[in-house]
Image (tube, rainbow, N blue to C red):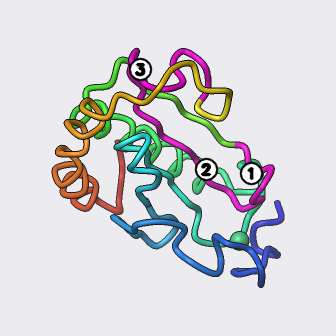
């Protein structure tokens, strides 16, 4: 309900003050950034452009559009990064500005099967991380090509 009353930007909010990471796509309503390459190549965030705290603050058409975008980014990450699993998360406890994490996960990654915010389960496999990082240019290209209209 509050979407029209929500301010477009809030001073001091890191996702209002900056893109929040490496910008790979920007639409009228949201943007896609790449983050934490060193540990989790292919980790994307979808950030709602306006300062909104909760998914339920969005009007239905925006919420539906956002979930289509989340789905499309997940699909793109699967195609390019071929993870064993994709993790989707929306917390906003630290930064209460609506964003989704889309994280390709591998059985060998430092935290699998735990969440990436949990204690590490094993040491990083530098060779495998480096091999995955080679796919990042393809991921950037695929994400950059996403249509803003996202009807499916
Ligand atoms: Zn914000």
Marks 2 and 1, the one that precedes in the sequence: 2
Q: Residues within 10 Å of mark 2 (few under 14, many from 20)?
A: some
User: Is label 2 in contact with label 1 (beta carbons under 8 Å)?
Assistant: no
Residue 87 image point, x, y percent: 51, 29
In the visual, does 35 lie left or right of 135? right
Which region of the structure is painted magenta?
A: 91-115
Q: On the image, numbered disc 3 is attached to which residue?
A: 85
Provide the secondary structure element on which disc 3 rests.
strand
State yes or no: residue 69 in magenta.
no
**Residue depicted at 36% across the width and 52% down the height:** 150
Residue 92's tag is: 1
Above or below, 83 against 144 in this view is: above
Residue 50's tag is: none
Query: Distance between the Cα atoms at labels 3 and 2?
Result: 24 Å
Task: Give the camera-side residue of 99 and 117.
Answer: 117
Residue 53 image point, x, y percent: 77, 58
User: Is label 3 in contact with label 2 (beta carbons under 8 Å)?
Assistant: no
Tell me the quarter of the picture where residue 48 sits: bottom right
Q: On the image, numbered disc 2 is attached to which residue?
A: 63
Provide the secondary structure element on which disc 2 rests.
helix
Which secondary structure is most common in the magenta stretch? loop
Q: How many marks?
A: 3
In the visual, does 19 lie left or right of 131? right
State which mark lies toward you, 2 or 1: 1
């Amino acid at each position: 309900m509050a979407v029209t009353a929500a301010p477009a930007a809030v001073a001091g909010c890191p996702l209002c003050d900056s893109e929040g990471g490496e910008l790979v796509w920007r639409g009228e309503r949201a943007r896609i950034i790449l983050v934490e390459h060193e540990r989790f190549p292919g980790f994307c965030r979808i950030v709602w452009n306006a300062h909104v705290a909760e998914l339920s603050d969005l009007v239905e058409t925006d919420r539906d559009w956002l979930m289509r975008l989340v789905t499309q980014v997940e699909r793109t990450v699967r195609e390019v990064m071929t993870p064993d699993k994709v993790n989707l998360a929306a917390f906003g406890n630290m930064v209460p500005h609506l964003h989704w994490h889309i994280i390709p996960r591998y059985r060998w990654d430092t935290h699998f099967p735990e969440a990436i915010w949990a204690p590490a389960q094993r040491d990083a496999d530098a060779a495998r991380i480096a091999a995955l990082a080679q796919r990042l240019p393809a991921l950037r290209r695929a994400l950059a090509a996403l249509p803003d209209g996202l009807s499916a």
